[in-house]
Image (cartoon, rainbow, N blue to C red):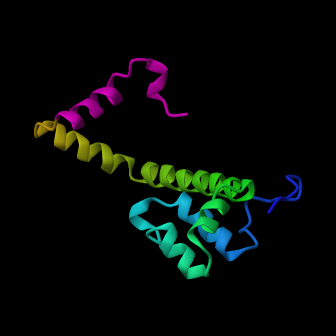
Amino acid sequence: MNIDPEEFDKTKPLDSPADEAIAEYLATPKSIRQFKSFVELAKHFNISRMTAYRRSKDSSVLQRVEWLLTQHQLAGDLVARLHWRRIVAGQVKAAIAGNTRAAEFCKERAWPANPFDFFPK
């Protein structure tokens, strides 16, 4: 499936439901995937495992994966920012209780190596 890059819009779902499912499969963490393997995905769409694998290398599928990953990351960043006070409070509590990883997290936030890192971008 070769698409002219000027015509392709990676923000829209791919035309083929199988290709869109492959892109979503690749962009989703293993623990929450709808399909647990390429075999399961291929069976669902009545295509061979190798066909699913080959389509996963298609440039339009990969561009869609890249866009989906960016959206997931932005959503995750937003959730973390919304709950930042609770996250830091939990880490401080854990550090006080002796959790060294939490203490390191707190130290890095309180005294960054580069003072300009103190303010988020």
Q: Quadrant of residue 108?
A: top left
Q: Give percent across and percent down for residue 10.
A: 74, 58
Q: Is residue 113 above or below residue 18?
A: above
Horizontally, is 79 left or right of 93 in the view? right
Quadrant containing the C terminus in the rendered view: top right
Q: Residue furthest top?
A: 114
Whether 25 is drawn above or below 117: the answer is below
Question: Which residue occupies 69% across, 59% down?
Answer: 61
Compared to 106, does 57 lie above or below?
below
Judge left or right: residue 28 versus residue 14. left
- Total of numbered circles in the picture? 0
The residue lying furthest to the left in this view is: 97
The quarter of the rendered structure image containing the N terminus is: bottom right
Majority secondary structure in the magenta region: helix
Residue drawn at the location 15% of the way across and 38% of the way down: 99
In x, y percent, where is residue 66?
64, 51
Of residues 68 and 95, the one drawn nearer to the viewer in this rendering: 68
Residue 102 forms part of the magenta stretch:
yes
Q: Is residue 96 above or below residue 71?
A: above
Tell me residue 104's x, y (percent): 25, 30
Task: Pick whichever, 67 or 30, lies toward us.
Answer: 30
Q: Going 50% across and 61% down the picture, which residue do you hit?
A: 28
Residue segment shown in magenta: 100-121
Along the horizontal axis of the image, is 29 left or right of 105? right
Q: Residue at x 64, y 67 (%)?
A: 51
Expressed as whole percent of the image width and height from the top left, the position of residue 113 reads 39, 18
